[in-house]
Image: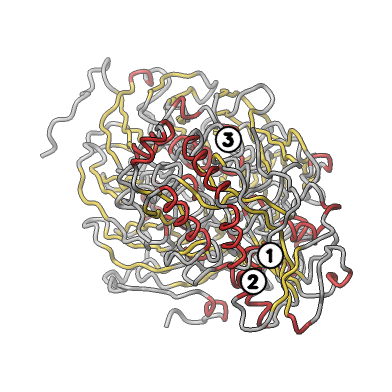
Amino acid sequence: MLVRGLTPLLNRIPAILCACCAMLSSASAQSDLASRMKDPGQWPMAARDYANTRYSELDQINASNASRLQLAWTFSVGADRGQEAAPLVVDGTMYVVGPYAGPYPNRVFALDATTGELKWSYAPKPEPAAAGVACCDVVNRGLAFDNGKVFLNTLDNHTVAIDAKTGKELWHTKLGEINKGETITMAPIVVKGKILVGNSGGELGVRGWVTALDENTGAIAWRAYSTGPDKDVLIGDDFKPFYDNLKGQDLGVKTWPADRWQVGGGTVWGWISYDPDLNLVYYGTANPSPWNANQRSGDNLWSTTIFARDPDTGRAKWAYQINPHDLFDHDEINENVLVDLELNGRPRKVLIHPGRNGYMYVMDRATGEVISADAYDFVNSYKGVDLKTGKIIPNEEKTPLVGKTVENICPSAPGAKDWQPTAWSPRTKLLYVPHQHLCMSFKASQVGYIAGTPYVGADVDMYAGPGGYRGEFMAWDPIARRKVWEIHEKLPVWSGALVTAGDVAFYGTMDRLFKVVDAKDGHVLWQFRAGSGFIGQPISYRGSDGQQYVAILSGVGGWPGVVANAEVDPRVRNGALGFTGATQDLPFYTAGGSELLVFKLGGANGEDTSHAPSK
Amino acid sequence: MRLRNSCPGIALGFLVGLATTAAAASDRELRVCADPNNLPFSNKAEAGFENRLATMVAEHFGQQVTYTWWAQRRGFIRNTLKAGRCDVVMGVPSGYDLVETTKPYYRSSYVFVTRQDRHLDLSSLLDPRLHHLVIGVHLIGDDGNNPPPAQALGDQGIVDNVRGYSIYGDYRQADPPARLIEAVESGSLDVAAAWGPLGGYFAQHSPVPLTVTPIRDYERFAPQQFRFAIAMGVRKGDDALRDRLNEFIDEHWSEITSLLRSYGVPLVDQPVTVSGGHE
């Protein structure tokens, strides 16, 4: 029923529901996404482009006028939980999605990108159990767009296609089971007519996958698991990993004790990038789970792994495991930014992966070779990366063991950087990195879990790293392999970054400031105090009035923000998986929010700062 | 399980902590936060021992029990007790960080559950047969932190013969944690290492006779605990309710113990270390 050439793996996909596969109007499968990426006026995908640069060619806002930024309009998405989504802007319309909360979970809104006028909204019908059984916060990281359709991932595992003009649902496909702990929080990406979607929920013993759906029908084209036999991982003869330890048959089974791979984690809840020339998509997988480390001896492939895959077939071309036998919950779902660099006198097609583990990986994206891996934050849980073998060098002194108190493990469980995406400027050749600066202690005392009662876990306590600050926004030079400038923040910097051709960079803080800085030296040019803290993704586009706009959602939440917006008791340092210790003063700075904020230049140059009615 | 709007009294809930005994006594409801699908502890049909205990408490207070149902996993306390939707959780580890706990009203142990007809007579964590028997444990996952038996087995290199059963399981099925004990009944496991109340209750209801034995020889795995004291939990600062619950526990110790026995809960006497305390 689905597609030609079904592999046995497809039989395992649970209950594929395609309720409304009627949308077969356009025979043309040619994507218009690539051309939209070339138009600086639009922001057609969460990362703006396939390379995941989050770079806008708009230059109206620059270092000399950024201080004149003003609020143009605002909009509420109506649900005060973590707002991590990137708005999209296509043909003058902005599409934005709210978190899985409030009366209409994961509601989608279409707005006039210039005036903020609401055109339509769409509310998926959630499974009733979802709110009660979902782990963590209930964020959504954004929508996707292609050929007149908006694509939404709901927390309860549906991918939905919506008519971009009318807001009507065209089809939806169920990809996972929330009752088994599986959820979807990532922003989908469309490549060659296929929507690529990955799952979340590793903590609950979910087996990670990425799935490709036909954008016209919602039919599943392929699914690649992150653990298990090669036929499930879509590894075949054309799989050529750079390093020897990744060569061999069924390593996704053999690097685990018997059958542990079946619930082995390696979920795919971060970013996917795409190189059209090499025809490869890139993404990282999450940590192994749900077994404790002493019950999962081995490297636990393909957890914490960067995969390069053929988007047409899903087949893996190469892979590289970042944290074999992960001990620290160091997911490696962080973005892979595709750039071309001149390294040692020769041009290289690389990907830059700011690792959760604190190392900035520069890799050959054709082969999977690690060219360099340098610490970009204070790291003592590892001793570096061996560039000959590609293997990270563990630091035995910092290995958490039951019965052993280990103090001062850096970086902590969320890593030096989590999901919050970086931005790359081809003008400055710098990567702009929002990240946290936290260490943690594993306390040996008082451990145990009582099944059937509320969780009592290991005491994981997080706190500010060396220097006493908890977050940083910095610029990294991947050629010189060093930090160029840095701004310390009191709280983890959990928002995404944006950089533009005006050589200014944007980010938000959890204590409610939206900042514009000079991309060359980090000088703060302007800041705006919003209603709630920022964990969203700034974007930029051109309005129908010719002006450059910048938009971001305000509303703290996510993992570190749970303490602020969900009333975790801030006196308890190890609530929310240890994160409240690091952010226990957050309620002092902010409560939850749900406001989309849109800015443009106003004032001195005589530009119009108000909107005439739009008709 | 639509819970979104089930809390008319958020503001009231936050004030309870400051209320006098008189004000609380005028309250006609004992508002309990509970999992609708988690026997032997609680379920929506109110067939769990925590449901029965809640009824006993309410009768003593001259109140009616009302429930806020929520799956008992990460976010449970946050979305129920702390959200002000309800005022008491009937079973939490004594000293549990996220809540104010009463004095413990029972103490239980992790147990081995086997089929009687196998005559395995297992009780020691150091039993050499554990290297070969097929052993089932519950999987938790949060923080990579599994129940104490999984940890202790791993410490001894006992890995390949250990099978995991998600404590959360498939929530569409009744009492997901029961799958572990059912696997012993069916013979797909030789032995389950389970938390006492789960092992004891499901063994009691098993179609084939099962043996339930508290796990011993755990001392060398310290500080990993195998015995825990269980208390009720209220919002931090709700000292008035905590004190009244403590009074109830003192006055009804023997009824509570009989209730637990009737649910097959293995009770242990020796003092246990309070877990999870952080203050």
Label 1 or label 2, whichever lies nearer to me, is 1
Q: Which residue carries the number 2 mark?
A: B180
How far apart are the two marked residues, 3 and 2, measured between alpha carbons?
Answer: 32 Å
Residue type highlighted by circle 3: Val
Please report the residue visible at 44 percent of the width from the left and 18 percent of the height from the top.
A525
User: Is A187 displayed left or right of A415 in the figure?
Assistant: left
Determine whether A294 is above or below A576 in the image: below
Query: Label 1: chain?
Result: B
Most foreground residue, B21 or A539: B21
Residue A614 horizontal side relative to residue A159, left or right = left
Who's the residue at 70% across and 38% down the image?
A: A345
Image quarter hosting the N terminus of chain A: bottom left
- Residue linked to disc 3: A572
Q: Position of residue A565 (x, y in %)?
A: 43, 37
> Dot 3: within a 10 Å radius of its alpha carbon, few (fewer than 14), some, or many (20 or more) residues?
many
Question: Left or right: where does residue A45 sit relative to residue A375?
Answer: left
Instruction: Work out how far the residue at label 1 is from the one at label 3, CA to CA, in angstroms.
Output: 28 Å
Colour mapping: secondary structure
- The residue closer to the viewer here, A523 or A131, is A131
Indicate the quadrant where residue A451 lies: bottom right
User: Mark 1 — residue?
Assistant: B194
Q: What chain letter is assigned to the residue under label 2?
A: B
Badges 1 and 2, same chain? yes
Q: Tell me the kind of residue under disc 2.
A: Leu
For mark 1, give the secondary structure: strand
Q: Tell whether label 3 touches label 1 (CB within 8 Å).
A: no
- Dot 2 falls on a residue whose secondary structure is helix
> Do callouts 3 and 2 mark residues in contact (Cβ within 8 Å)?
no
Residue lying at 78% horizontally and 82% vertically, measured from the top left: B118
